[in-house]
Image (cartoon, rainbow, N blue to C red):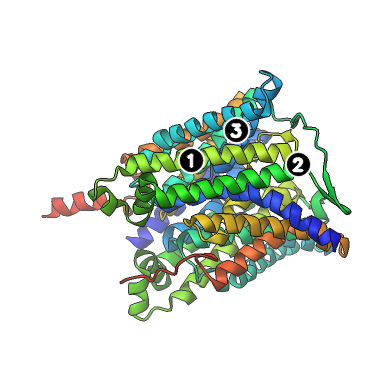
Amino acid sequence: MELFIQQIINGLHIGSIYALIALGYTMVYGIVKLINFAHGDIMMVGAYTAFVGITIFDLSILMALLLSVLVCSILGVTIEKIAYKPLRNAPRMWALITAIGVSFFLQSLIMILFGASTKPFPSFPSNPIKIGSLQISQITIVSVVVAVILMICLELFIKKTKLGKAMRASSEDAQAASLMGISVNKTISLAFFIGSALAAIGGVLFVVAYPQVKPMMGVMPGLKAFIAAVLGGIGIIPGAMLGGFTLGFIESFTKGFVSSFWPPATLWADAVLFSVLIIVLLIKPTGILGKNIREKV
Amino acid sequence: MKSNTTTKFLAISIVTYAILAVCMATGVINGYISGIIVSILINIIMAVSLAFVTGYLGELVLGHAGFMGIGAYVSAIITMNIDLPMFIEFPFAVICGGIFAALIGILIGIPALRLRGDYLGIITLGFGEIIRIVLNNLKITNGAQGLSGVPSYSNFTITFLIVILTIVILYKIINSRQGRVVIAIRENEIAADCVGVSTFYYKTMAFSIAALFAGIGGGLYAHYHTVINPTSFGFALSIEYLIIVVLGGMGNLFGTVLAGIILGILNEALRSFSEYRTIIYSLVLITIMICRSKGITMQIIISKINVSKKNNPEKLNQRRHKKC
């Protein structure tokens, strides 16, 4: 039972990080219908920025976090302006290939700047809070709290503010939105801005939880966050959160709980994730919270 | 016109083969370069088969390397475990690999092809990764170490022959009744459904044909590199083939072949830049895509060097105008 609750806590921790990254995927997909494959690498850049900030400039972790948010959000908007904007009216597969190109570019740029090797990230002293035999590290609490607060803020921003309204309108029908006087270009930039900032925060939280940085570190979390976004229903913001936490739970259960009865479960954890994705997509093709859109002839 | 294109293509390929074979025999092309040529040829098989699904059927597939992995493993296990002369066991193994990949393709295709567009892409990505993880964890595939000591059967001649066969067979399929149905599904699935085409049957067919050739490509790969491990058949490889297909003009076999050759050469030419290789490669990729969106397409380049007049609507229009 304790193992069970421990795994719920671990799932919350990793799930909150996935959810933060998934939000960026969902927001961008909602408006431009583009699977932004470079998103995981933006998260990686965020982690590296924090790494540089802490090891070279001796910043505190909070300052490093702010720095990486700044760098990533500027990076995200710049990428959108340079690489994606010219392809906005092109077939979607071209934009997809461009996104993959951007992802390669960021990976190789970091590889040239910092080398391909894995570097240890300075770890933080953490006194786990003990409840009975349960251990909750402060990092876990901070991650979950930060993630939940950000998600609530984002949800309020989307639902209550004018810019959020513009965003919802553009994602529903970009053409009609532009006819109503909404600057779709600015809205798209805003989506990239917020998405990249959240990815940076996710990256820093990830690197604090698993204290090492390497150029390819963004690929797997990026892919999983993307799965989380699809699982919850891509383009739907609460869906990304739900998907992220679901994925975190599934992962920590197969790795931590099932493996105590069946040791090879750790090796199959990713296969379980993908199987869940496939099953959900087959039963409900638009994701858990997705609305079924009928195709008109 | 149709048979004309085929004969022309065969003539070009025979000449290419003769030139390359003579160069290899006389030592103008050394072993290293001929290795690159074989890799490019295998890439062409993979890209052309993916072009059939992505270009002609119009469905995004992000797990093509998974089928290649199945073909590679099945054929490698067969040749390593049976003891027959090379000319019997090699074709048998490669064909078995292809058929096994096609069967898995049907198995995956039946549920997956109910979805469309990005969702199909995601689900094939999921299946591709599952295939890789299964290969990584089974006993018969020797886990993460992979198989080594696969007999070295693939060489330039065999690979070239299979490339030509693949292209001719796919070309014939595309220009047959079945191929026209596949293209009709791409153009408008609902309309195709309405005129009585079983879209589901044809989609699964196209998907399994692509998987068949991917499996054959995998068999050649395994018997060329002699060492295979699951990590080489991951997501990155699927993406590499998709890039070739998209650059080749999606739904243009000869464009795909050309894109495969150009990207292969580019990849090698950039090798001397070592760590700057991927950065240049990615920049070239982004630039090409942005150029294409501005109207500089592979089709125009192809029509300039006169490989496929038939697929170029502009030329066709010009000719029509002349007739008028």
Report which residue position mark 3 lands on: A45
Q: Amino acid type of disc 2?
A: Gln
The span from disc 1 to disc 3 (Cα, nearest Å) is 15 Å
Q: Is residue B306 above or below residue A281?
A: above
**Contact? badges 1 and 3 (CB < 8 Å):** no
Callout in the foreground (2, 1)? 2
Q: Amino acid type of disc 3?
A: Val
Q: Earlier in the sequence, mark 2 or mark 1?
A: 2
Q: Amino acid type of disc 1?
A: Ile
Q: Which disc, if any, is residue A194?
A: 1
Q: Circle 3 — which element?
A: helix
Q: Which is more toward the observer, B207 or B265?
A: B207
Q: Residue at x 33, y 39 (%)?
A: B296
Report which residue position mark 2 lands on: A138
Left or right of residue B281, residue A112 in this image: right
The span from disc 2 to disc 3 (Cα, nearest Å) is 25 Å
Q: Judge the density around disc 2: few (<14), some (14-19), many (≥20) Cα neighbours within 10 Å.
A: some
Q: Earlier in the sequence, mark 1 or mark 3?
A: 3
